[in-house]
Image: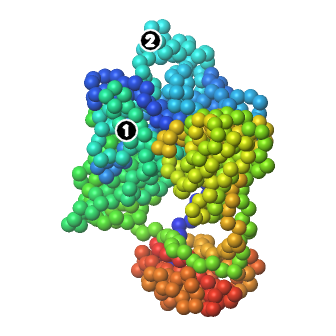
Amino acid sequence: MRNLSLFAAAVLSSALAAQSNTVAGLDGRLTVINNLTYYGRRGPAHPNGEIGMAMLNTMCNTGSVNIPWFAAMQPDHPMFGFIIARVHNDKIEQINEWSFCKHAFTSINVNGQCGSCQNPGTGSLMGVDCSDTYAASNNASRTWLGPPEEINPWLGTWNPVGSYFDIGDPSQAGYPAPADGTRSLSQSIFDSVDNRVTVKEVDLTTAGASYYYALQLLHEGESLANRGDNLAHRGMNPSFGGSNWSFSNNAESQQFGSVISRWPGSTVNSASNGTDDGRFFVAAKVTTLGGGNYHYEYAVHNVDNSRAGGAFRVPMASGVTASNFSFGDLDADGANDWTVAQVGTDVVFTAPTGNALEWCTIYNFGFDADRAPGAGGVELVEARPGAGAPSVTVNAEVPGGVILAGFDTFGDGCEGSVPQPPVTCPDLNANGGTLSNSTNAYEYSYVVQNSGAMDVISFDIFTGTNAGTLTRPAHIYGDAGGQPSATPLASTTITVQPASGFYTATFASPVTVTGNFYIGYENSPGGYVSNLNSGTNGTGYYRTAVTGNWNQSNLVQRPSWRVNCSTAPTYFTPDMGVTGAPQLGTTYNPTVSDALANTFAILVSGLQTPGMVPLPGAPTCNLMTSTEALDMVSTNAMGDGSSPIVVPNSAALEGVNIYHQWAIWDPSVNSLGIVLSNGAIATLGN
């Protein structure tokens, strides 16, 4: 064990908590959001009115149990929340109102991104590995749109008795109706905007702004550990055409997580209220103003905290003065803005009655301070009583603060002699079959389930034509949030003849793909869609042109294709990791994996990085740290090793960076007999 006064450890991740009503094995995945669609406007002439919109989403069941899907007025079904966000003036803000939420009412149970559907035989359940798409028109239907305040986002619960659907819209004659649990809602007074995702037109016309749409999926009883794929967002370009709006997707493709991560230069962290309530996400960005002054800007997204945020507290070091406070919510009503004051060493924003930070909303907080940033924790004080602690603390930069320990890897190592499992080129219905002979002029692509990296040389599609020989463009696409990317990774051509069979598209050079990818070609009138009358289920997507939006195909159920890939042997690169945390007064362990078994490994540690220094006699191996300390260990039979490092409890070490890299004795690889892992930076802190 080495005792080095210069080392620190990464912050330990807290265990994911489960809420009280967790259903073991329940796990829904939001695979696609797409097709943000305009449904009407109201108010003064453009650009001073407001518009209603909706978006498409696809989800699937990646868990081990069926997902309840009982239509309202029964309580247990998925629900969807919506956000439209804008990045402008160096902040990200929500520009839609607290939108009504979709209550899902039936599952069609088809194949999708989760695999081959285990159909339960009823639309009141989503079977394991089954998928379902709710089109924008479906999510725009006011029959199934209800107020978000009726939903407990942490538990995923909703009570139909006394709900908006139950008592109706009180602005109509004869309402509210008795709270008897029977649907009473009439839509007779609705215009084209009511209850849909609503945005003021002027907020969509900001020059130089970036725009995003986001969707959140809720399930009753889904554990927090399974919610990482329940939030998704993607970039779009709003455009007014003289009488209506359009929202084309842009190059900022679908991503999972909170939409506040789209704010360039910000850092995003989150925390929940233990096992009792949900999460707040906080994006923070600090800008230097000069003269020792800094601007602190925060965007806070309440994802699923049911008690809501009633105050936002930012701690500061002693002697700091804050000024120029700013606040932003979902409306232009200054009368309900949060108040703000410096209270001792805290900046405290406080919500008035009726304007707490509710779930599926983003509020903005800002101020200037005369102190440089350090790591700390901002505090969200709960707005309402309930189970759990009175507040939630989220890591973020604050004036002064402390430096948190960190451990981040960088760079690339070089391959050793440990072989990776041989690559198996994927296929689906590899023997072909009888085509359904469906034909149209769309471009089709078919999902290829894949893990890891692969070099694709060509692919074969089982198809044919009824219009003679056709030569058409063929493409390979990466994955963009569960659907093909907007632009291809590479393109070639494919020639298809009338006889049904496999036809080949060969690329000029191998195409490297990682994870799932998509293959297909631009069909032409007379070209058959690859869909067999029988065989193994698969998934296809279509669009009208290369620049259009992809949609999952309900026509394609059993495509037939083969991928031809490089089967040359590949080898593992030793990988740097860590256990423990390089915190002051603790021990952490840099680790190596995927190395040669039962050999010598040296942990090289230094106070700086020299960049990429090639090792003589070891091509592609670059030393990325100085060599103040060397620690030798032996790898085990699995090719793993570690070296413990003790960090003294000295405040003088806070913020010091230490660089690490592993050197492994692997004599058959090169003349030097050494291979290297990737590098790591350990930041000493608290």
Figure check: 369 above or below 219: below
Q: Nearer the viewer, mark 1 or mark 2?
A: 1
Residue placed at 36% from the left, 24% from the top? 41
As rendered, which of 448 and 56 lies closer to the eye? 448
Residue placed at 45% from the left, 58% from the top? 395
Q: Residues within 10 Å of mark 2 (few under 14, many from 20)?
A: few
Whichever of callouts 1 and 2 sits on the residue coming sooner in the sequence is 2
Picture quadrant where residue 542 is located = top right
Residue 20 is at least partly visible in this image: no
Indicate the amino acid at tag 2. Gln
Residue placed under numbered mark 1 in the picture: 238
Residue placed under numbered mark 2 in the picture: 172
Figure check: 110 above or below 452: above
Image position, residue 380 (x, y; %): 44, 48
Residue placed at 53% from the left, 67% from the top? 11
As rendered, which of 574 and 226 lies closer to the eye? 574
Picture quadrant where residue 678 is located = bottom right
Image position, residue 674 (x, y; %): 62, 87
Picture quadrant where residue 456 is located = bottom right
Return the residue found at the far top.
174
Indicate the amino acid at tag 1. Pro
Image position, residue 376 (x, y; %): 42, 62
Image position, residue 205 (x, y; %): 30, 38
Is 513 situated left or right of 128 in this image? left
Figure check: 142 above or below 429: above
| Gap between marks 1 and 2 measured at Cα | 34 Å
The reply to whether the C-beta atoms of the residues labelled 1 and 2 are less than 8 Å apart is no
Return the residue found at the far front.
468
Residue placed at 62% from the left, 24% from the top? 72
Residue 11 is at least partly visible in this image: yes
Q: How many numbered marks have been drawn onto this rendered protein structure?
A: 2
